[in-house]
Amino acid sequence: MSGLKVDVRPDGIYVWAFMDFKRDTTDEWICTLRQVMNEYDTRNEHLRCLAYFSESALPTPYSTSQAISMLRDRPKSLSISAAMISENSLMFGVVRFAMQQAQRVDFIRLCKSEQEALAWLDERHTLFEANGQL
């Protein structure tokens, strides 16, 4: 069983809760996210994601390389915003490393609280609604 739980809030925000980064968790995350990104890109909709990393969700070389590939290969026309909250400070270091390996990652925000994350996602969505893109 994977260490990933995915839900969609009533406001349309995808919530990704990571308990670990074992290979099956990473594969499920990447496969699901790629599918969702393609759907949103096709419909020209704003994909909003809120990611929670538990203290036990320690990055692995495999999960890091898959995240970098996903960042590099995402549809360039996709309007996406991803806010991340972690109980483990090591996770933010790995996220920053992955962000440095890809271009144009201004759609990712590392947050200290759910309130901060949701406020930023709402700001980004307001911009998307006003302009039709980000």
Image (cartoon, rainbow, N blue to C red):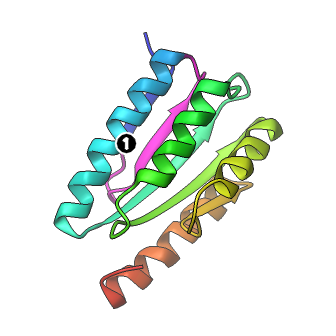
Q: What's the magenta bit mostly, secondary-structure-wise?
A: loop
Q: Which quadrant of the figure contains the C terminus?
A: bottom left
Q: Give the range drawn in magenta.
A: 8-22
The residue singled out by tag 1 in the image is: 33
Q: Is residue 19 magenta?
A: yes
In the picture as drawn, the residue positioned furthest to the left comes out as 43
Q: Where is residue 125, by image quadrant?
A: bottom left
Residue in the image at 42% along x and 81% along y: 126
Foreground of the two, 1 or 71: 71
Residue in the image at 33% along x and 36% along y: 32
In the picture as drawn, the residue positioned furthest to the bottom comes out as 130
On screen, residue 90 versus residue 57, left or right, reads right
On screen, residue 50 versus residue 88, left or right, reads left
Q: Where is residue 12, by image quadrant?
A: bottom left
Disc 1 crowd rating (10 Å Cα; few below 14, some 14-19, many 20+) is some
Q: x, y (%) of residue 119?
A: 57, 69
Mark 1 element type: helix
On screen, residue 82 versus residue 53, left or right, reads left
Tell me if residue 22 comes above or below residue 67 in the rendering.
above
Foreground of the two, 90 or 74: 74
Q: x, y (%) of residue 34?
A: 33, 44
Q: x, y (%) of residue 46?
A: 33, 67
Q: Which quadrant of the figure contains the N terminus?
A: top left
